[in-house]
Image (spheres, helix red, strand yellow):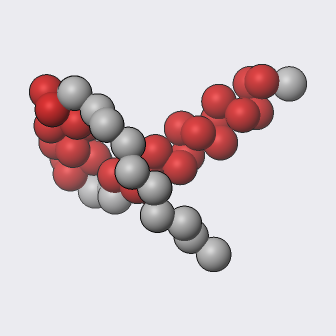
Amino acid sequence: MKKRINVTIDEKIIGRFQDYCKENAMKVSSKIELLILEELKNEK
């Protein structure tokens, strides 16, 4: 199950990130999810 959240991100940063995701054929939300999982793994 997926949960919708709201976050506030600088418009220049999110613009660059959206471009990055588009160039790499990935969804923004999927990439953010992977980055969160990677951070949680590094927590241990």
Q: Is residue 17 visible?
A: yes
The residue furthest bottom is 1
> What residue do we see at 22% from left, 36% from top?
14
> What residue do we see at 54% from left, 66% from top?
3
Image quadrant holding the N terminus, namely bottom right
| Left/right of residue 27 with respect to residue 1 in the rendered view | left
The residue furthest right is 44
Give the image quarter of residue 18.
top left
| Left/right of residue 4 with respect to residue 27 in the rendered view | right
| Left/right of residue 40 with respect to residue 44 in the rendered view | left
Task: Point out residue 27 in the picture as x, y percentages from the top left corner.
Answer: 34, 58
Counting every numbered tag in the picture gives 0
Give the image quarter of residue 36.
top right
Give the image quarter of residue 25.
bottom left
Image quadrant holding the C terminus, namely top right
Comparing 44 with 9, the one in front is 9
| Left/right of residue 12 with respect to residue 25 in the rendered view | left
Q: Is residue 2 above or below residue 26?
A: below
Q: Is residue 14 above or below residue 3?
A: above
Task: Point out residue 34 in the picture as x, y percentages from the top left corner.
Answer: 55, 46
Task: Point out residue 12 in the picture as x, y percentages from the top left corner.
Answer: 13, 27
Q: Is residue 16 visible?
A: no
Q: Is residue 32 above or below residue 44?
A: below
